[in-house]
Amino acid sequence: TNGKKAFEEQLASNGALRYPNLFLMVANTVGVWEKLKSGRFELTAGENILSFVRKLRNNKQASVKLVLNKERTPQDIAGLLAQQFQIDSAGIVSFFSNNEALAPFEVDSNTVTTLFIPDTYYINWTTSIEKILQRLKKERDAFWDKKDRLNKANALQLTPNQVYTIASIVEEETNMNDEKGNVASVYINRYRKGMPLGADPTIKYALRDFSIKRILFGHLEVKSPYNTYRNKGLPPGPICTPSKTTIDAVLNAPNTNYYFFVAKDDFSGYHKFSETYAEHQAYAKAYQQKLDAYMAQKNNTGK
């Protein structure tokens, strides 16, 4: 069979077995080739031939270790899955765009990212995109059922998808876990007051240009539902896959009167938070002056 031929070629090329001819004889005797299915099988160091033959005959496949970290777009996620599984990237993107196909998973083309809770998952290489999403939905539901997360979302008058979307913005705004709650409180306060969120990372997402260092007025003109300067309320879906830590920071956000924040002028990566726009402007001016001085010094040193 083709499976047998492919297997023989692989054995010959990588030298995984010390006695390939003996393996083939045993495999032929117990009828491996009639039962062999497409997939990944792990041959561990020192494993004997009979043990490996049983794996093949009983279809005991090695799982793919799928590590989900921060991904930004559904296309990025499709690329990651296509690298790991026997599925085509274009097919995944098409599936992610099909609201009818996504309906059983309680998501649409904008919110499909909410199925992806960053973690490590073990899934068979031959698993279809539908089965992968079924597994991830199960994991997502289990995540929200733990640590009183659903009740905390309800207390904020937000759905889990809305919490995830806010968390995705917070994830892009700061790397500092101990200030994520305050950043979340700013966006929750703006959302409740009916203000535009005015989140710079949503502009990068709308433009699909994540290399932008500083958002300029021209960038703010982009016509997109993800432009949170032009549109009030939350964007239609997340702008990345936030960590569990960030999701929990939103759920446990402190009650504040903060509506603004700007990078601290010590360039530590932390932010200063303000209740009033006047206070925010003062902090922003101080930061800009420090930044200008730093850049001038850097340019002079470089000459």
Image (cartoon, rainbow, N blue to C red):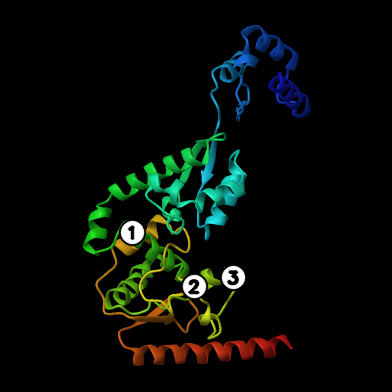
Q: Is residue 103 above or below residue 271?
A: above
Query: Label 2: which residue?
Result: 224
Dot placed on the residue nearer the N-terminal end, 1 or 3: 3
Q: How far across and how far down the image is residue 195, in percent?
A: 33, 80
- What amino acid is labelled 1 in the image? Asp
Q: Report which quarter residue 173 is drawn in.
A: bottom left
Closer to the camera in the image, 159 or 25: 159
Left or right, 256 with reference to 280: left
Say whether marks 1 and 3 touch (CB < 8 Å).
no
For the C terminus, the quadrant is bottom right
Q: Is residue 7 above or below residue 235?
A: above
Dot placed on the residue nearer the N-terminal end, 2 or 1: 2
Left or right, 195 with reference to 213: left
Closer to the camera in the image, 266 or 166: 166
Q: How far across and how far down the image is residue 6, in percent?
A: 73, 25
The disc label shown at residue 188, or none: none
Q: How far across and how far down the image is residue 99, in percent?
A: 45, 52
Q: Is residue 226 above or below residue 214?
A: above
How many numbered markers are drawn? 3
User: Of helix, strand and loop, which one carries label 1?
Assistant: helix
Query: Label 1: which residue?
Result: 248
Name which residue lies at 27% across and 78% down. 193
Structural distance between the alpha carbons of marks 1 and 3: 28 Å
Other residues around mark 3 within 10 Å, as few (<14) / some (14–19) / many (≥20):
few
Structural distance between the alpha carbons of marks 2 and 3: 14 Å
Closer to the camera in the image, 125 or 26: 125
Closer to the camera in the image, 39 or 284: 39
Query: Label 3: which residue?
Result: 209
- What amino acid is labelled 3 in the image? Asp
User: Of helix, strand and loop, which one carries label 3?
Assistant: loop
